[in-house]
Amino acid sequence: EIAKVSEQSADLDKEIAKLREENLSLKTKLDDFDHVHAGANPKHQQAEEHAAMLGLKLLCSNLLEIDARLVQLRTSAELWEERVSTLRSTERLQISQISTYESKRAEFSETLVSSSSVFASLDEQCAKHKSRTEELNAENVKMSAKLTGAPARRAAM
């Protein structure tokens, strides 16, 4: 869009230069015409001068319109440049955020792996303790049975 506006601006600059050259050429021709026809019919001369003035006014009007369009296109180009700059800043910020998120995700992944390892170790220890608890409970039951039977055996003795 900026290139298009720049191209239109260059085209308008060329057209303005062409109109200025044409304006100078017409002025020179008008001056020459005035000198040649100075003694001609005054009404005819006035009509031609009026027509030349109208032509000159038309050229000036066209030049003003082109100048206004050029200003408009330059303003538009500046706005587009600001928009592009803003979008580039936003893009850089988002890329930075993505990088931070990727780093945090990798860190979280490492934490999960480490936690999984710790939980596996704790599960192992729980299984050992459960096995040991079951052994101790079985031994406790045996000892209780022996203790319960011990007074009866002593009395029998």
Image (cartoon, helix red, strand yellow):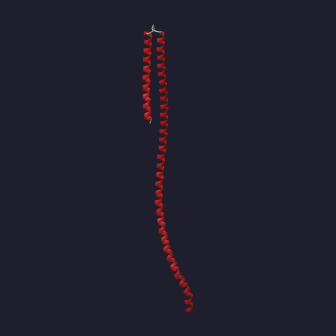
- Relative depth, front residue between 65 and 156: 65
- Relative depth, front residue between 138 and 49: 49
Image quadrant for the C terminus? bottom right
Residue at position x 42%, y 31% from top? 7
Return the x and y of residue 96 as percentages of the image width and height.
Answer: 48, 46
Residue at position x 42%, y 28% from top? 11
Return the x and y of residue 39 as percentages of the image width and height.
Answer: 45, 7
| Count of number-bearing discs | 0
Image quadrant for the N terminus? top left
Q: Where 105 falls versus 77 (above or below)?
A: below
Residue at position x 47%, y 59% from top? 112
Return the x and y of residue 38 as percentages of the image width and height.
Answer: 45, 8
- Relative depth, front residue between 135 and 43: 43
Instruction: Identify the residue at the far bottom of this view.
Output: 156
Return the x and y of residue 49 as percentages of the image width and height.
Answer: 47, 14
Q: For this view, does 151 lie left or right of residue 52?
A: right
Q: Where 141 falls versus 59 (above or below)?
A: below
Residue at position x 51%, y 79% from top? 138
- Relative depth, front residue between 114 and 87: 87
